[in-house]
Image (cartoon, grey):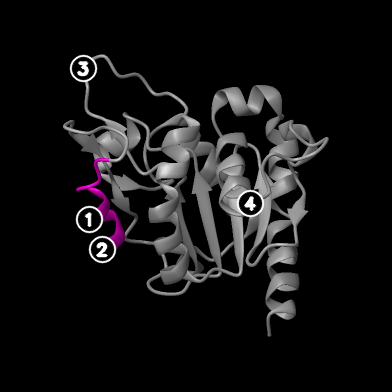
Amino acid sequence: NQVFLSAKGCQRCYPGKDTHIPLPDPKNSTGKSEIMFINERPGRIGTGKSGYVSFDNDDPSANFFKECFEAAGLDRESVFITNACLCHPIDAGYTDSQPTVAELTNCHHWLREQIEVVQPSLIVTVGWTALQSMLRYEGLWPTTGRKTFGAWVGRTIRTTSPWIYAVAHTSRKGRANRSAELQVSDWIKIPQILEQANHLHQ
């Protein structure tokens, strides 16, 4: 929680403005986690009610995230869930929107601190924005010939440490671009990829 509490004082993206930064889910693993899930940014509805980055929030993206998570048979106590961009501005005119490149790179400071604490064996990026953030973080952007999400989704990047595995966003829009059936099939590969990553780093 300390990283998130410290981030509440961040003025990089919205100097002089208040921002909403929900805390990590209390059900997350404490300390080291096997998997770090990185979503896009907190939504107004789910996190606005609960105050947490959680797939137990009552919104369509969180609901399908939970469905995929359960289909994969993952251990809830071995994962940590966060966002590529930790905040959104508290503004009457704000609507849920994708983070800009500047917001993503500004948040790399907080991402680095989370990775150092969590020390995951595998990072799962949920959606194109989260993947682009990690590619930039790892110095892999711009890429050659792989600038569309279709070239990455369902694939594992094994040249980084930890490995990165890309799945589609669990929002309704994400399911329109990659069907719910395909998304579930991507998720059920996660335990095997995690086993391979753990074996490599033993």
Q: Are marks 1 and 4 in contact (CB under 8 Å)?
A: no
Q: Residue at x 74, y 62 (%)?
A: 159
Question: What is the secondary structure assignment of the residue under circle 2?
Answer: helix
Residue picked out by circle 2: 2
Between discs 4 and 3, the one toward the N terminus: 3
Residue picked out by circle 3: 92
- The quarter of the picture where the C terminus appears is bottom right
Alpha-carbon distance for marks 2 and 4?
A: 27 Å
Left or right: 51 in relation to 167 = left
Q: Are marks 2 and 1 in contact (CB under 8 Å)?
A: yes
Nearer to us in this view, 2 or 195: 2
Q: Amino acid at mark 1?
A: Leu
Alpha-carbon distance for marks 4 and 3?
A: 36 Å
Alpha-carbon distance for marks 2 and 1?
A: 5 Å
Between discs 3 and 2, the one toward the N terminus: 2
| Snapshot quadrant of residue 114 | bottom left
The mark found on residue 139 in the picture is: 4
Which region shows up in magenta?
3-11
Question: What is the secondary structure assignment of the residue under circle 4?
Answer: loop
Q: Amino acid at mark 3?
A: Ala
Q: Amino acid at mark 4?
A: Gly
Left or right: 53 in relation to 198 = left
